[in-house]
Amino acid sequence: MDYRLLEIIACPVCTGQLYYDKEHQELICKSDALAYPFRNGIPVLLKNKARSIDIKTADLITKTINHESSIE
């Protein structure tokens, strides 16, 4: 995943920030609690292709991602 891409793409539903979940190979929107998949290395930013995740999971994933990126 090219992290520069995260600086220019946004959630198609709310236009909010997306977080890359390396473990699950998904982009996470914390605000909408949606996880967007990758297909052949390309993010599929379509609401009907995203899976819903609960708010607690979204919060935990984004906190973990923020913590890991602050360490690097």
Image (spheres, rainbow, N blue to C red):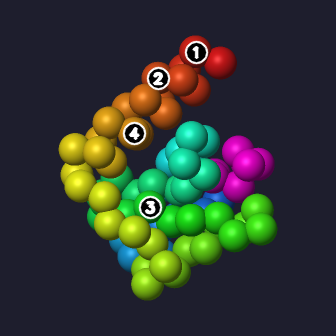
Label 3 or label 4, whichever comes before in sequence order: 3
The answer to whether 68 appears left or right of 39 in the picture is left
Q: Which residue carries the number 1 mark? A: 71
For badge 1, the amino acid type reads Ile
Q: Looking at the image, tell me whether mark 2 or mark 4 is earlier in sequence order.
A: 4
Image quarter in which the C terminus is found: top right
Contact? badges 2 and 1 (CB < 8 Å): yes
Inter-mark Cα distance, 3 to 1:
24 Å
Residue at point 45% right, 72% down? 50
In magenta stretch: residue 51: no
Which is nearer the N-term, disc 4 or disc 1? 4
Disc 4 target residue: 61
Q: Amino acid at mark 2?
A: His
In magenta, the rendered stretch is 1-7
Task: Point out which mark residue 67 bears.
Answer: 2
Q: CA distance from mark 3 to mark 2?
A: 19 Å
Q: Which mark is residue 35?
A: 3
